[in-house]
Amino acid sequence: MNRKKIWLLLGGMFFLLFIIGFILISQKSSSPSNLTANIEAEKENIEEVIDQVQEKDEEVENEENRSISNNLKDAVESTIGLFLRNDYKIVAIGDSLTQGVGDSADNDGYVGRIEDAFSNEDQRVSIDNFGKRGNRSDQLLKRLEDEEIRSSLEEADMILLTIGANDIMKVVKSNFMSLNEEPFIAERSAYEQRLQEIIDIMLDLSPDAEIYLIGFFNPFEGYFDDIEELDGILTDFNTTGKQLTTEKQQTHYIPTNDLFQIEDVDLLADDNFHPNATGYTLIAERILTYIRPIIEAAHEESENEEEASEAQ
């Protein structure tokens, strides 16, 4: 190792020690009174709820707490690579679930929580959020013509998609006085065709991207809890989306409906339609279970390529 590289490495180590010392001093001087009421409300009983979800989903793994010394060691070893490594880019797109409507903590729903999770880890992840309240699959197809969205998708390593709940709601509103199964069957067929087209467009724009379709929960129970057929209709729509994702290796399905069947826990916002802060936290935890291994593998591959390049 030449003298220049040694000085760069030592400089990086002293810089990291200074930053960690500053953070520790800042944490000691922080007062609990600075926490907002929203954050306190979100954290109330959230650990217990997440534990229930983790028991149901064997894939969820508890994150191990790292000591400051281990963090320092890891950081020093990856100092040079940290500044050379490209961000892993995620594009989140779809309806109000992606926009984060109902999140009383003002943390952009599940997207904000995923960003927070990776900001506390070594992985550098950036997320573009194109969630839009009320979006149906036909409206999302039109939005895919937007140059800003297309440009973002072209650079995406991963795409998170929520769409379909408003397609069902459109049928409910149009047939409110005489709800029956026929219009939902017709709409589900049209939804399947549009969803297939959405996925095809995304793969055309970013052929190597991993696409995750996030299933929706039953948002109608608060309004139509006396109509049992709606739960079956929602299940059929989710099944349609899940089956589509099995047709390509790069497309995946993430269920969320079971999360909102946990008893004695309020997971909906005041509108009884969108998730509240706790509901979005559970959705984010479920999504992270699926996507974290993919992102970690991508970063490991990137690091290996950098080490191989430096060795030459």
Image: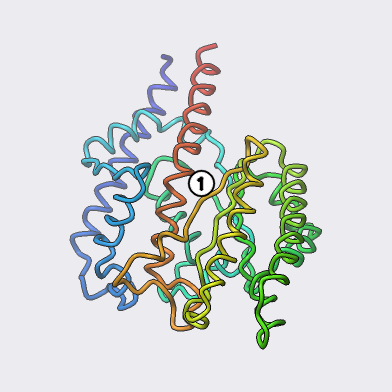
User: In this image, 92 relative to 254: left or right?
Assistant: right
Residue farthest to the bottom? Answer: 177
For the N terminus, the image quarter is top left
For the C terminus, the image quarter is top right
Between 100 and 184, the residue placed more toward the observer is 184
Task: Indicate whether 110 appears above or below 10.
Answer: below
When asked about the image quadrant of residue 195, the answer is: bottom right
Between 157 and 21, the residue placed more toward the observer is 157
Please tell me whether mark 1 sits on a helix, a strand or a loop.
strand
Across and down, in percent, residue 175 comes to 70, 82
Crowding near the residue tagged with mark 1, few <14, some 14–19, many ≥20 C-alpha atoms within 10 Å: some
Determine the residue positioned at 18% across, 60% down: 28
Q: Name the residue under label 1.
A: 125
Task: Indicate whether 87 appears above or below 160.
Answer: above
Determine the residue positioned at 55% across, 65% down: 232
Across and down, in percent, residue 221 comes to 48, 76
User: In this image, 205 relative to 280: left or right?
Assistant: right
Total residue callouts:
1
Determine the residue positioned at 25% across, 70% down: 44
Task: Indicate whether 275 appears above or below 225.
Answer: above
Across and down, in percent, residue 234 comes to 57, 65
User: In this image, 226 relative to 264: left or right?
Assistant: right
Across and down, in percent, residue 219 comes to 52, 73
When asked about the image quadrant of residue 15, the answer is: top left
Type of amino acid under label 1: Val
Picture colour scheme: rainbow
User: In this image, 43 relative to 248: left or right?
Assistant: left
Residue farthest to the left? Answer: 28
Determine the residue positioned at 59% across, 56% down: 92
